[in-house]
Amino acid sequence: MTDELSPIRPHGKEGGRTTRLDAELDRLRASAKDAFGQSNGSSSNASFKSPNFNTGVNLMGIFSRTRDIIAANFNDLLDKADDPSKMIRMIIMEMEETLVEVRASAARTIADQKEMGRHVAKLERLQADWSEKAQLALSKDREDLARAALVEKKKAADMGDQLRTEITVLDDAMRAYEQDIEKLQTRLREARSRQTAIAARLESAENRVRLRTLLASERVDEAMARFDQLERRVDYAEGRADALSLADGNSKPGLADEIAALAGQDKIDEELEAMKRQLGKEG
């Protein structure tokens, strides 16, 4: 089933790529060694340590993988899957892992930005130091040393400019991270909603299958036959009770029966008297 997720993974190896940032930082390190590694004794106190940035952040690999997931067609993946429920779980797991990686990469990028900013500040102080040394050498009529100090100052300035350029690149990367994280979270919410809907539909379908299987089985017919037998037994018991009450004709009538008989007799007497009065009028 893992092969079915291949459409949302980038082609190629992420770990094997060398980004522009990696190459540029390597070049800056080499430049720093050339700029400060050959300084004479008068400049040893102003030497600058080459930055040691985290080059493990593979920006292109992370962006490619994230945007492949964002652009993935869930419907197409689910239609082709033998088990859509399992497929949606794997998609969600893939998205959650990618989201963790993107956030971790963004955190490393922020750390690199801060470290670069600190090195830019060091380079600015180094430029000021070389400028003071150049002025001191010139005041002592050592124009050669003053010129060499100004060369070192320019190297520090150039490296500072390069680091500022890289900070700008990382600013752009951070904006891209923010956009991709927001889109990835939206897709993750969509996938989780689809997972809930698929689970509900699957449960409903399974319940219908169980119900129809139960209705089609002999167990239901047997249960209904037992109900029929029970109803017949109740009918038989009620019939016996009615028969016993009919056979017991000599039993003394109850109070309610006697009162009802009196009321019936009064009605007959009233009707008889009315008939007599009617005959008397006619005579």
Image (cartoon, grey):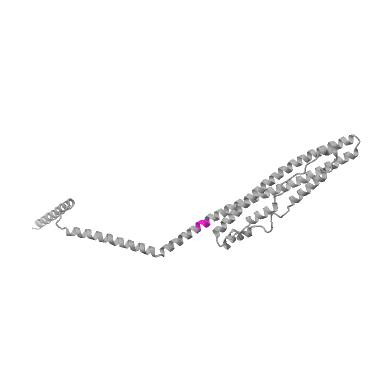
Residue that appears at 53% across and 57% down: 198
**Relative to 55, 83 lies left or right:** left
Q: x%, y% of residue 162?
A: 78, 46
On whether residue 282 falls in the magenta region, the answer is no
| Identity of the residue furthest to the front in this view | 41
Residue that appears at 38% across and 63% down: 220
Number of marks present in the image shown? 0
Q: What stretch is highlighted in magenta?
A: 197-201
Residue 217, image quadrant:
bottom left
On whether residue 198 falls in the magenta region, the answer is yes
**Relative to 96, 214 lies left or right:** left
Residue 128 seen in the figure: no
Give whichever of 144, 52 is nearer the camera. Answer: 52
Residue 228, image quadrant:
bottom left
Residue 99 seen in the figure: yes
Residue that appears at 74% across and 47% down: 166
| Above-or-below relation of 45 to 174 | above
Magenta stretch: dominant secondary structure: helix
Residue that appears at 28% across and 61% down: 233
Q: x%, y% of residue 185?
A: 60, 51
Q: x%, y% of residue 70?
A: 63, 55
Give whichever of 248, 278 is nearer the camera. Answer: 248
| Identity of the residue furthest to the right in this view | 141
Q: Which quadrant would the C terminus be assigned to in this image?
A: bottom left
**Relative to 108, 194 lies left or right:** left
| Identity of the residue furthest to the left in this view | 283
Q: x%, y% of residue 15?
A: 69, 54
